[in-house]
Image: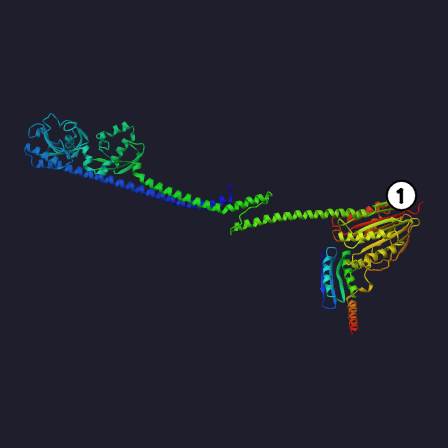
C-alpha cells in the first residue's frame, strides 16, 4: 500500500498537505521529508487534510507529532481536518492532539484560519 | 551432419562455388576433349583416304603401261620378237615403281611357236636385264600363275594378289596383267610387276612411311605391312599366330566397309589401337593405318588432363581461400565460445582481444566487460553478504539482549498462589519496540506494564530500552501508576527531537485485597475477564502517549477485582494483525478468543490468543510486534 501526498501552498502563510492511502513504517519517511520541506517555508499553520487517509500506524503518528512539536515551538499550529473514523480512533488512543486542532469540516477550518489571519494582521498593526 | 559455424560457412560458400565452377569446368574440359578427339579422328580418316587415293593413282599409272602395251600389240601384231625385248625394257624404265615387265604369248600363237615371254626386270638400281622367261623351263601357263590366267578369265586387265616371284628375284610382288587379242581371240598378256618391298618407299612420303601402314589384299593376305616379314602372309596366319581371331574378322570388315575406322586391342601392344582404313579401288585392296591410342590421343588427353588439373587447382585454391576466410571470421567466435564456456565453469579470467570494430570484436569486448562486471558484482556480493551477516549477527545479539531485559514469560506466586502472570512477545523484526514487565513490590503489590514504542525495528528498540530502563529505575520508588507515567513522560519528552513515543499501560494490583490501580498513556485498554467468562473493558481516562506532551497528567482508575479475574493487556500488534485481505483482527475477535479460554490457565490463554492471531493472519506478513500480557488474581489466599 502506498501513500499519496499533495502539498497545497497556494494560501500562504498556510501549508496544506492532503494525505491518502496508508501511512505506516514504510511510507512515513517520505512524509517526514515532505514535512521538512513544508516547515522550511515557516508557515503560520500546517493543515493535514486526511480525507483519503485509510490507515495510520504509530510511525505515521510520530511524523505528525514531530511536525506539531516543531510548529508549537515556533508558535505555529498543526491542524487536522476530514479525519476518518479509523484514523480518528488511533489518534484518540494515543491522545496527543490538542482538541482544538481537529476540525470536522473544511468550512470550520477555513473559518478558523481566516480568524487566525485577521489576528496576525491586527497584531502587526 | 553436425557442423560448427566455420564448417557451415565453409560449406555454404565453398560448396556452391565448387559445384558450379567444377561442374561447368568439367563439362568444358569434356567438350574440349571430345572435340579434339573428333577432329583427330577426322584428320586421320581424311589422311588415310588421301593416302589410299594416292596409292590407287600410282597403281593406275603403272597399270596404264601394261594396258597401252596390250593395245599396241593388238594394233601391231607383227612386231619382231627382238623389238618385243626392247618394249619390255622400255616398260620397266618407264616408271620407277615397275620392277619388271613381260609380254607373254599363248604358246600356240607365239612368234616362236612355243612358250615365248620377253621379260625385263631391274637387276640392280641401275641395270635392267631382259630375258625370255618362257625358254628357261618356266611354264607360265601353269595353274598357279594368276597373272596368266586371271586376265583371260576376266577378259580385261587385272591385278594379281601378292605372290612370291621365285623365278626372277625372290621378291614379293603384285602384277597387273592386260590381255591382247588377234581376230577376237586372246593370244597373250602384257604385264608390269610391282615389288612390294619398294612400294612403301616409292609411294608414300616420309611421314606416312614412319607409321604403321598396311595394305590388305582382296584375298585377305598382307600386300604390305609395317613389318616387312608379314608381306604376303595371309591374315588368317597372323590371327592364328597372335591368337587374335578378331583380326581376321576385322580384315573382312575392312574390305567390306572401307572407308572407316575402328578401335580395338592393339595387334602388337596391350594398348588400345585405332585402325583407320580406306579402299584402294583399282586393285581391290584396303589401306589401313594402325595407331596406338596414346600416340593419337596422347596430346588430347594431356591437354584435357592439364585443363582438369588447372580446374582442380583453381577449386582447391578457392576452397583454401574460403577456409582461410571462414577461419579468420570464426576464430574470434571460437575464442569467445571457449571464454564463455570457461566463465560458465566459473573461471572468470577472460582474456579476449579488445581490438577491432566489427560485431564480433564488439561482442568480445562486451563479453569481457560483462565477465569483469560479474567478477565485481560477485566481490560486491561477497562484501555485501559479509556486511549483512555482520548486521544480522549484531541484530541477533541485540535480540538476545533485548529478550534478556524482559522478565520470564511465566510467573506464579510460589508462596501463596495469589496470582499467575503469562506473557508472549513476538517482534515483527529481529528487535522491536514492544515490552512488558512485572514486579512484586515490597508493599505487596503486583505492578505490571505493557508498552508499545512508535514505529518498528532498531529505532523503536533503542527507544524501548530507554523507556524500559526508565521504568526499572522509577517503578520501585513511585507510589501510583499515575506518578510513574507522569515521571516517565517528562523524562522521555526531554531530548526527543524525532518525537518517538511509547504507549504505555500500567497496573498495580494489591495482592492481599484485589484493589487495582490502572493508568494508561495512549495505550489500548485492558480487558477484564471474569471467572464465568464475562468480559469488560477497563474504562480509564487516557493520558497521551509518553514522550509527546511534557507535563501531561495521567489519571488513575481504581478497580476492585474478584478472585479468579483475569486481565488481558495487549499491543496493537494483536488488534491490528491483518489477514491477507487487509482486515484487522480487531477487538471482537480478541474478545471471542479470550472468552473461549476463560477457564484455561493464564499461560494457555496467552498462547491460545496468540495462536488465534497467527491463524487469522496466516500467510500475511506480520506488520507489528505482537505482545500479550495476562495477569490472573486468584484472591487473597493465606
* Residue ID for mark 1: B414
Q: Judge left or right: residue B116 versus residue B573.
A: left
Among all residues in the image, which is located at the extreme right? B638
Picture layout, residue B172 above or below residue B530: above
Look at the image and name its color scheme: rainbow
- Label 1 resides on the chain identified as B
Query: Is residue B600 in sight in this rendering?
Result: no
Query: Is residue B252 in sight in this rendering?
Result: yes
Front position in the image: B392 or B40: B392
Picture layout, residue B353 above or below residue B90: below
Number of marks in the image? 1
Q: Judge left or right: residue B421 versus residue B9.
A: right
Q: Quadrant of residue A79?
A: bottom right
Front position in the image: B587 or B217: B587
Residue A48 picture location, percent across and down: 76, 63
Q: Check the picture and name the quadrant holding the C terminus of chain B.
A: top right
Residue B449 picture location, percent across and down: 85, 51
Among all residues in the image, which is located at the extreme top? B137
Q: Quadrant of residue A100?
A: bottom right
Residue A32 picture location, percent across and down: 73, 59
How packed mark 1 is, by other alpha carbons closer than 10 Å (few <14, some 14-19, many 20 or more), is few
Q: Quadrant of residue B46?
A: top left
Residue B384 picture location, percent across and down: 67, 48
Check disc 1 and report its element: helix, strand or loop: loop
Amino acid at each position: 500500500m502506498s501513500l499519496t501526498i499533495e502539498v497545497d501552498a497556494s494560501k500562504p502563510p498556510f501549508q496544506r498537505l492532503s494525505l491518502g492511502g496508508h501511512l505506516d513504517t514504510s511510507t512515513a519517511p517520505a512524509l517526514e521529508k515532505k514535512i521538512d520541506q513544508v516547515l522550511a517555508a515557516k508557515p503560520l499553520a500546517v493543515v493535514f487534510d486526511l480525507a483519503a487517509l485509510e490507515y495510520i500506524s504509530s510511525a505515521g503518528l510520530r511524523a505528525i507529532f514531530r511536525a506539531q512539536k516543531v510548529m508549537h515551538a515556533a508558535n505555529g499550529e498543526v491542524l487536522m481536518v476530514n479525519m476518518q473514523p479509523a484514523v480518528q480512533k488511533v489518534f484518540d488512543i494515543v491522545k496527543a492532539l490538542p482538541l482544538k486542532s481537529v476540525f470536522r469540516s473544511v468550512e470550520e477550518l477555513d473559518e478558523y484560519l481566516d480568524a487566525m489571519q485577521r489576528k496576525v494582521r491586527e497584531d502587526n498593526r | 551432419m553436425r557442423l560448427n559455424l566455420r564448417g557451415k560457412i565453409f560449406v555454404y560458400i565453398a560448396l556452391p562455388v565448387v559445384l558450379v565452377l567444377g561442374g561447368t569446368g568439367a563439362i568444358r574440359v569434356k567438350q574440349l576433349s571430345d572435340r579434339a578427339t573428333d577432329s583427330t579422328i577426322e584428320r586421320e580418316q581424311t589422311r588415310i583416304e588421301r593416302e589410299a587415293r594416292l596409292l590407287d593413282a600410282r597403281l593406275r599409272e603403272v597399270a596404264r603401261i601394261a594396258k597401252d602395251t596390250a593395245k599396241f600389240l593388238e594394233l601391231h601384231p607383227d612386231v619382231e620378237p627382238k623389238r618385243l625385248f626392247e618394249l619390255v625394257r622400255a616398260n620397266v624404265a618407264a616408271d620407277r615403281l615397275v620392277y619388271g615387265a613381260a609380254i607373254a604369248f599363248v604358246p600356240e600363237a607365239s612368234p616362236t611357236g612355243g612358250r615365248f615371254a620377253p621379260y625385263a626386270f631391274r637387276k640392280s638400281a641401275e641395270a635392267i636385264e631382259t630375258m625370255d622367261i618362257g625358254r628357261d623351263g618356266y611354264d607360265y601357263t601353269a595353274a598357279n600363275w594368276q597373272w596368266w590366267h586371271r586376265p583371260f578369265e576376266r577378259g580385261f586387265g587385272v591385278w594379281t594378289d601378292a605372290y612370291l616371284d621365285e623365278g626372277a628375284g625372290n621378291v614379293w610382288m603384285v602384277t597387273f596383267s592386260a590381255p591382247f587379242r588377234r581376230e577376237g581371240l586372246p593370244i597373250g598378256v602384257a604385264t608390269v610387276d610391282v615389288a612390294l618391298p619398294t612400294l612403301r618407299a616409292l609411294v608414300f612420303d616420309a611421314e606416312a612411311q614412319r607409321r604403321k601402314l598396311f595394305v590388305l589384299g582382296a584375298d585377305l593376305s598382307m600386300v604390305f605391312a609395317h613389318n616387312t616379314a608379314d608381306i604376303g602372309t595371309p591374315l588368317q596366319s597372323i590371327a592364328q599366330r597372335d591368337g587374335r581371331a578378331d583380326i581376321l574378322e576385322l580384315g573382312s570388315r575392312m574390305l567390306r566397309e572401307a572407308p572407316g575406322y575402328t578401335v580395338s586391342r592393339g595387334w602388337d601392344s596391350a594398348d588400345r589401337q585405332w585402325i583407320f582404313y580406306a579402299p584402294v579401288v583399282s586393285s581391290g585392296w584396303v589401306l589401313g593405318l594402325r595407331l596406338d591410342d596414346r600416340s593419337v590421343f596422347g596430346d588430347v588427353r594431356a591437354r584435357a588432363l592439364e585443363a582438369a588439373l588447372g580446374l582442380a587447382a583453381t577449386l582447391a585454391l578457392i576452397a583454401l581461400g574460403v577456409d582461410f576466410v571462414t577461419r579468420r571470421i570464426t576464430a574470434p567466435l571460437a575464442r569467445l565460445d571457449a571464454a564463455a564456456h570457461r566463465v560458465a565453469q566459473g573461471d572468470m579470467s577472460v582474456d579476449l582481444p579488445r581490438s577491432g570494430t566489427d560485431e564480433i570484436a564488439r561482442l568480445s569486448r562486451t563479453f569481457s566487460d560483462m565477465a569483469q562486471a560479474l567478477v565485481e558484482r560477485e566481490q560486491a556480493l561477497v562484501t555485501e553478504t559479509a556486511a549483512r551477516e555482520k548486521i544480522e549477527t549484531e541484530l541477533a545479539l541485540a535480540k538476545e539482549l533485548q529478550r534478556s531485559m524482559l522478565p520470564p514469560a511465566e510467573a506464579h506466586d510460589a508462596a501463596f498462589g495469589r496470582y499467575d502472570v503469562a506473557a508472549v512477545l513476538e517482534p515483527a523484526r529481529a528487535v522491536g519496540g514492544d515490552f512488558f514487565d512485572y514486579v512484586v513490590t515490597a508493599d505487596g503489590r503486583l505492578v505490571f506494564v505493557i508498552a508499545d514504542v512508535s514505529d518498528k525495528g532498531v529505532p523503536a528498540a533503542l527507544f524501548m530500552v530507554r523507556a524500559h530502563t526508565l521504568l526499572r529505575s522509577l517503578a520501585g520508588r513511585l507510589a501510583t501508576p499515575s506518578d510513574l507515567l507522569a515521571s516517565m513522560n517528562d523524562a522521555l519528552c526531554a531530548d526527543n527531537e524525532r518525537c518517538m513515543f511509547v504507549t504505555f499501560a500500567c497496573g498495580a494490583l494489591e495482592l492481599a485485597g484485589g484493589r487495582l490501580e490502572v493508568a494508561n498513556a495512549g495505550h489500548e485498554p485492558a480487558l477484564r475477564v471474569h471467572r464465568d467468562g464475562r468480559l469488560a473493558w477497563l474504562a480509564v481516562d487516557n493520558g497521551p502517549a509518553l514522550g509527546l506532551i511534557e507535563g501531561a497528567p495521567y489519571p488513575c482508575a481504581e478497580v476492585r477485582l474478584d478472585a479468579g479475574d483475569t486481565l488481558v493487556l495487549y499491543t496493537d500488534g494483536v488488534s491490528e494483525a491483518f489477514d491477507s485481505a487487509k482486515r484487522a483482527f480487531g477487538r471482537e475477535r480478541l474478545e471471542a478468543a479470550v472468552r473461549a479460554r476463560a477457564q484455561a490457565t493464564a499461560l494457555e490463554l496467552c498462547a491460545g490468543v496468540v495462536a488465534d492471531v497467527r491463524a487469522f493472519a496466516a500467510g500475511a506478513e506480520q506488520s507489528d510486534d505482537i505482545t500479550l500480557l495476562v495477569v490472573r488474581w486468584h484472591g487473597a489466599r493465606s
